[in-house]
Amino acid sequence: MDTPLDFSYETRPGRVVFRPGAAVSATPGEVARLGLHRVLVVCGSRGEVTARAVADALGGQCAGLHAEARMHVPAEVAARAVEVAREIRADGCVAVGGGSAIGLGKAIALRTGLPLIAVPSTYSGSEMTPVWGLTEDGAKRTGRDLAVQPRSVVYDPELTLGLPVPLSVTSGVNALAHAVEALYAPDASPLVSLMAEEGVRAMTGALPAVAAAPGDLDARSRALYGAWLCGACLGATTMGLHHKLCHVLGGTFGLPHAETHTVVLPYVLAYNASAAPRAIATLSRALGTDDVPRALRELARGLGAPSTLAELGLEEADLAVAAAQAAGQAYPNPREVTAHGVLGLLTAAYEGWEPRVGS
Ligand code: NAD
């Protein structure tokens, strides 16, 4: 330790249950624990079968199922879900699915104050955070509010057995990005850093096994365990350049969420490395390598993930616009964020060059 310890850490309310089969076996108990009797179950259209199984297990505790979640929570989708919750006089909400379904549950909680239970089926980490997002007129707004933090999170690795390998890999790297940025966040703390290190170790260890055998419950459990820890890091700290840049690329240019995180992360890490030596040392330990940006890129590429922004549909002319947008906002980052610096980073990610530390 080269500098004296200096940190604040706040524990967040919320309970976690982690077990194969928990979506069906544990959710009714979590609903009862919160004293709820008429919950609305929300999910996306592709997650309806799973959500219906949860609703069936809830029996009389469930007052309705609403399968309208969409990526980035369009405002009209949120408004309709709030209307449904009011119509059926729901006293709580259970969101079953990925970040999109949980995002819709958060929108309901934000507007109505209803308690939220999350049953995640991807590695996005949204279930562990008080961060909400809403998209209106093509622009995504986000904010923090403890009212949207799920009161209980039910992790069931069996739900992730059918998560397609490409999405498992990119969603897993999305989780890694939370841990990476938590390690150099201004509000980092020793406990969060331990969670980040263990989260990275668990997720990077599990992903090759998940890709090789997507139905392997042990590999799925280790990946979901990593996702929990990385999500907890996201909930506890303030994110930097990587998350802002992905937000710009998704919000302004419509790039897909998890894939964008996957392509960009090694390049942001290379950009920030010289200003975040302790984060790099922790990641080196977790990954067993001296070249963390390269190892992350090779891991994702080796498992078939996209590796350039060009592949994701970004145009070369967009690079300067995205760089200016990402540099034009205020947020903490270990290294100064300049439009020139971000343009260099984005160009490398667009072309798929080897990420070079300090460039
Ligand atoms: P997603 O929820 O949109 O899911 C992606 C696709 O995978 C969907 O078609 C979904 O139906 C499908 N899917 C989900 N789970 C599945 C499963 N187990 N098996 C088969 N298919 C499955 O994507 P995501 O990456 O989980 O979430 C992205 C969204 O979450 C974005 O809007 C992002 O901004 C938000 N997010 C928010 C936070 C936060 O803290 N607020 C954190 C991370 C992500």
Image (cartoon, grey):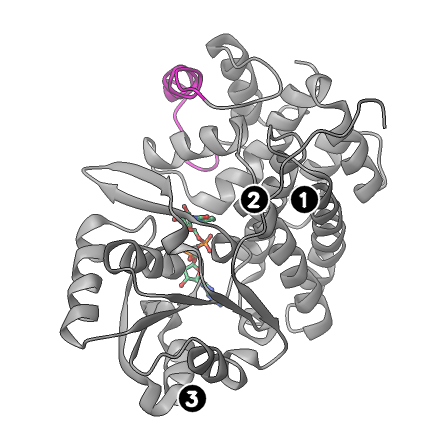
Tell me the element at label 1: helix
Q: Percent x, y for residue 21?
A: 58, 82
Query: Label 3 crowding class (10 Å Cα cut-off): few <14, some 14-19, many 20+?
Result: some
Distance, label 1 to label 3, CA atoms, is 35 Å
Q: Residue at coordinates 48% horizontally, 78% vertically from top-left?
A: 30
Question: Which residues are the magenta region?
Answer: 311-330
Residue marked by disc 1: 192
Q: Residue at coordinates 24% horizontally, 49% vertically from top-left?
A: 74
Distance, label 2 to label 1, CA atoms, is 7 Å
Distance, label 3 to label 2, CA atoms, is 32 Å
Magenta region includes residue 195: no
Q: What amino acid type is highlighted by mark number 1?
A: Val
Residue marked by disc 2: 236
Of label 2 and label 1, which has the lower sequence position? 1
Q: What amino acid type is highlighted by mark number 3?
A: Ala
Q: Quadrant of ligand 1?
A: bottom left
Q: Percent x, y for residue 37?
A: 32, 83
> In this rendering, would 323 be left or right of 21?
left
Tell me the element at label 3: helix
